[in-house]
Amino acid sequence: MDVLYFAWVRERIGIPREAVETQAGTVMDLVEELRGKEERYAAAFADISALRVAVDQQLTDFDAPLSGAREVAFFPPMTGG
């Protein structure tokens, strides 16, 4: 599946997107896998309360299932102005 990173998440990880082979059942399972890859991922996902997630371009929660998902995107909350 494609995993996309936006704003400071992208800055901490150092790439905007990557293809990930995963057996993760939920978004949180994927986050745990990513945290274990390298320190930069651990730093980016240290506080998931500061993140939002979309699965196949639909906002969702971290307990959302990933079965059949093609894309997961991580980004900070949107602010208006």
Image (tube, grey):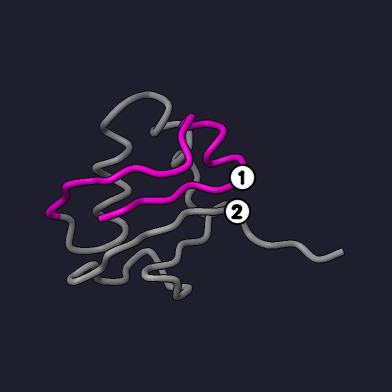
Query: Counting other residues with Cα less than 10 Å from the Cα at mark 1, is it few (<14), some (14-19), or many (20 or more)?
Result: few
Q: Count the labels in the image.
A: 2
Tag 2–tag 1 contact (CB < 8 Å):
yes
In front of the other: 41 or 48: 41
Magenta span contains residue 8 = yes
Which residue is pictured at 54% across the width and 53% down the height? 75
The answer to whether 29 is drawn above or below residue 78 in the figure is: above
Q: Which residues are magenta?
A: 1-23
Which residue is pictured at 44% across the width and 57% down the height? 73
Task: Please provide percent x and percent y for residue 15.
Answer: 46, 34
Identify the secondary structure beneath mark 2.
loop
What amino acid type is highlighted by mark number 1?
Answer: Ala
Identify the secondary structure beneath mark 1.
loop
Q: Residue furthest top?
A: 39
Sequence-first disc among 2 and 1 = 1
Tell me the quadrant of the picture where the N terminus can be found: bottom left
The answer to whether 53 is drawn above or below residue 13 in the figure is: below
Residue denoted by label 1: 7
Task: Please provide percent x and percent y for residue 58.
Answer: 45, 75
Query: Counting other residues with Cα less than 10 Å from the Cα at mark 2, is it few (<14), some (14-19), or many (20 or more)?
Result: some
